[in-house]
Image (tube, helix red, strand yellow):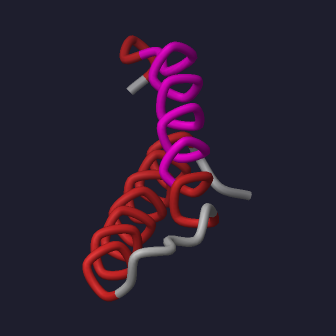
Amino acid sequence: MLNKIDRLTIYALMGFISFGALVISTSASEQASLMPVWGVIAAMIGLQLEVQQYDTSKH
């Protein structure tokens, strides 16, 4: 089972990888795929939810 810090790390890495794929794909061709955009949006939503639910008093 993953704890909240592990999930935050996974969301941050997912956002970083998706952003990198978005930058590389848009500079290489005119027609970009929407999958990296959805990855960045999903990472932002996941980070927002995890940060709102994270309670520092438990650690």
Which residue is located at x 40 percent, y 76 percent? Answer: 30
Magenta portion: prevailing SS class: helix
- Magenta stretch: give its range: 40-55
Q: Judge from the rendering whether residue 1 lies leftward or rightward of residue 27; answer left or right.
A: right
Q: Residue furthest front?
A: 30
Q: Quadrant of the N terminus?
A: bottom right
| Residue 38 x %, y % | 61, 52
Q: Is 54 colored magenta in this rendering?
A: yes
Between 28 and 1, which is closer to the camera in this rendering?
28
Q: Is 28 colored magenta in this rendering?
A: no
| Residue 22 x %, y % | 39, 68
Between 40 and 10, which is closer to the camera in this rendering?
40
Q: Quadrant of the C terminus?
A: top left
| Residue 25 x %, y % | 39, 80
Q: Residue furthest right?
A: 1
Which residue is located at x 53 percent, y 65 percent? Answer: 36
| Residue 46 x %, y % | 58, 37
Q: Quadrant of residue 9?
A: bottom left
Which residue is located at x 55 percent, y 50 percent? Answer: 7
Q: Quadrant of residue 53?
A: top right
Q: Judge from the rendering whether residue 36 lies leftward or rightward of residue 1; answer left or right.
A: left
